[in-house]
């Protein structure tokens, strides 16, 4: 066995030596031709002929040594699986320098891929990797199918109460805006979509709820909403249909006819009874105020009307104050971040980026094939664990649900450390750029402000573009019962889940691994779009929500590309989630 191994090594060595000697002779012939041309052009002959020959001879010796070491270092059966090592790049300059110039790559292909660092002896079964890819494809397809086929209302435990609260508070903010100074009205009109669009979406949501709900308050609130939006005839038509339905819809029909009908008032005492019925049927809020005011006006009861309006004004002003404070915070972040974006734009052509935080960044120094195998296997395990949590974890156990995010990402991170980081001699801090030092904190703040502002501007542009097509995010996609109705401790746990766990582990998985591995094959834009698309699909949102999440994913990938660190994306992701949570709590809690 030893004799055969030595014989195979020497045969391979001699074969490679013969190939390299042939290359050397061809190189010498080209060198002789070049030196023969120089005298004919009137130039003196260069004195480097001997040095050229000695250089080629040294390259030939390097090739011989390279072939011998390859045979000695590569075990039998692993020749096709040899992972590139940084040493191989040092030992092969001759073959690279003697090759013809390579053609330019397509725009979508990566051109700045670094060599792989380290030794990656592990071998992954192609069948297991393929099954993992198929499983993840089925999971993403199921998410898309369920999002398109099932009702968003199934996600909400009490959709009637939730939608009533959401519409009532939103209308309170609009009423408060009418009482604000003119400049505030113009500012808020610029930041939000028009009232007509909001009315249309809310009526559509109530119609969707009325089709599946048996709560009699839903059609009553829908009729009030339609009448206040100017569709009085539609509200009265619905009231006429209720007269033939069961209780309490006939009484609700009398209320709607009395409040929005055009007939004369014959019996004022009836309006007093109807006022009592309204107070008993509807909770305090915008729906009660609108119906009670209409009845008071119809009965010419000015004292009752003034009392209702005074009570409503206190609630409306309080609600508007809570909401517009957060809006000013977002506007301030947009203003400061816009200035930073302009600064980055003006300095975009500088040779060394002043926002760089860490090296090596992306593309990472890992083999793309091993990275893809790790990502597919870890993602498949994480998807299975997520399914188990959804099926068997108690829905009211918020701490366990919050831990689902880190627990489902642990297998992927362990595989990445074992097969990517450790072979390359890196820690997570090195590979993800999580340790940057206090001296670069200013750069970190600049990038975070720019990315947050770009995200807010992107949301604003999408809202403007969606208006002509009557598109919006479904209210059930951003409504969260734990942020609205839960105890303070459970609400705090939900905030930890949304603001800490989700940004950290989602950025590690989708930008730190998925985007980084794609960058070894693709240029920035295709890699960012593919990773952001998968990131958006995994959230299960509708079209507008999907586009919003994809835009955020592209921005966070850009921050990783430019800085070499995941910290800007993690912080920007956390700030984005925090603003959404605060908006929900300011409006609904």
Image (tube, rainbow, N blue to C red):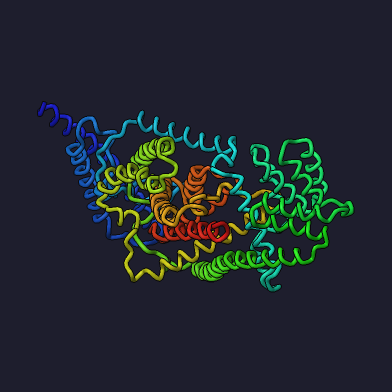
Q: Residue at x 76, y 41 (%)?
A: 250
Q: Is residue 545 above or below residue 322?
A: above
Residue 182 seen in render: yes
Residue 369 seen in render: no
Q: Nearer the viewer, residue 57 or 117?
A: 117
Q: Position of residue 422 (x, y in %)?
A: 25, 48
Q: Residue at x 33, y 64 (%)?
A: 436
Q: Residue at x 71, y 39 (%)?
A: 247
Q: Position of residue 478 (x, y in %)?
A: 55, 50
287 on left or right of 558? right
Q: Nearer the viewer, residue 53 or 404?
A: 404
> Dividing the image into 4 quarters, which one contains the C terminus?
bottom right
Count all numbered tags in the image, as a single digit: 0
Q: Position of residue 325 (x, y in %)?
A: 56, 68
Q: Nearer the viewer, residue 472 or 84?
A: 472
537 on left or right of 261? left
Q: Position of residue 134 (x, y in %)?
A: 44, 31
Q: Is residue 433 above or below residue 1?
A: below
Q: Spot the residue most to the left.
A: 2
328 on left or right of 21? right
The image quadrant of residue 419 is top left
Q: Residue at x 35, y 44 (%)?
A: 407
> Dividing the image into 4 quarters, which one contains the N terminus?
top left
Q: Is residue 281 above or below residue 310?
A: above
């Amino acid at each position: 066995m030893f004799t055969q191994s030595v014989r195979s090594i020497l045969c391979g060595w001699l074969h490679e030596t013969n190939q390299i000697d042939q290359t050397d002779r061809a190189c010498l012939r080209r060198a002789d031709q070049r030196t023969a041309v120089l005298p004919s052009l009137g130039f003196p002959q260069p004195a480097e002929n001997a040095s050229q020959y000695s250089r080629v001879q040294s390259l030939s010796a390097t090739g011989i040594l390279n072939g011998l070491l390859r045979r000695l270092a590569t075990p039998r059966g692993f020749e096709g699986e040899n992972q590139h090592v940084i040493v191989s790049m040092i030992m092969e300059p001759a073959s690279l320098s003697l090759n013809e110039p390579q053609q330019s790559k397509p725009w979508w292909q990566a051109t700045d891929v670094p060599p792989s660092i380290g030794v990656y002896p592990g071998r992954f079964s192609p069948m297991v990797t393929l099954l993992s890819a198929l499983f993840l494809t089925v999971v993403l397809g199921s998410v898309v199918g369920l999002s398109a086929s099932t009702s968003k209302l199934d996600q909400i435990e009490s959709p009637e109460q939730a939608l009533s609260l959401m519409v009532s508070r939103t209308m309170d903010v609009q009423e408060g805006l009418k009482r604000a100074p003119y400049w505030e009205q113009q500012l808020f009109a610029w930041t939000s979509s028009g009232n007509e669009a909001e009315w249309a979406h809310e009526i559509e949501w109530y119609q969707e709820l009325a089709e599946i709900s048996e709560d009699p308050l839903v059609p009553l609130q829908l009729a009030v909403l339609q009448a206040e939006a100017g569709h009085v005839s539609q509200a009265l038509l619905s009231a006429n249909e209720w007269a033939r339905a069961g209780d309490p819809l006939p009484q609700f029909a009398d209320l709607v006819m009395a409040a929005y009908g055009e007939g004369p008032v014959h019996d004022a005492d009836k309006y007093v009874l109807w006022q009592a019925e309204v107070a008993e049927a509807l909770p305090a809020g915008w729906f009660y105020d609108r119906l009670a005011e209409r009845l008071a006006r119809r009965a010419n009861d000015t004292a009752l009307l003034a009392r209702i309006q005074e009570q409503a004004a206190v609630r409306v002003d309080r609600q508007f104050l809570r909401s517009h404070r957060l809006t000013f915070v977002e506007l301030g972040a947009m203003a400061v971040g816009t200035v930073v974006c302009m600064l980055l734009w003006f300095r975009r052509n500088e040779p060394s980026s002043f926002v760089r935080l860490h090296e090596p960044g992306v593309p990472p120094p890992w083999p793309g094939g091993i990275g893809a195998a790790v990502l597919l296997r870890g993602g498949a395990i994480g998807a299975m664990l997520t399914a188990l949590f959804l099926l068997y974890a108690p829905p009211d156990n918020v701490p366990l649900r919050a831990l689902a995010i880190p627990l489902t990402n642990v297998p992927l991170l362990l595989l990445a450390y074992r097969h990517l980081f450790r072979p390359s001699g890196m820690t997570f801090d090195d590979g993800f750029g999580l340790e940057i030092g206090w001296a670069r904190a200013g750069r970190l703040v600049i990038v975070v402000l720019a990315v947050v502002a770009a995200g807010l501007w992107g949301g604003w542009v999408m809202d403007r573009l969606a208006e002509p097509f009557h598109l919006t995010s479904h209210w059930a996609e951003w409504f969260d019962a734990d942020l609205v109705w839960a105890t303070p401790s459970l609400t705090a746990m939900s905030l930890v889940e949304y603001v800490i766990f989700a940004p950290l582990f989602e950025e590690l998985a989708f930008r730190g691994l998925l985007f980084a591995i794609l960058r070894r094959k693709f240029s920035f834009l295709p890699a960012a779009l593919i990773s952001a698309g998968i990131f958006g699909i995994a959230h299960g949102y509708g079209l507008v929500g999907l586009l919003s999440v994809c835009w955020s994913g592209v921005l966070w990938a850009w921050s990783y590309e430019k800085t070499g660190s995941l910290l800007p994306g993690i912080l920007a992701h956390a700030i984005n989630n925090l603003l959404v949570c605060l908006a929900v709590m300011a409006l609904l809690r």
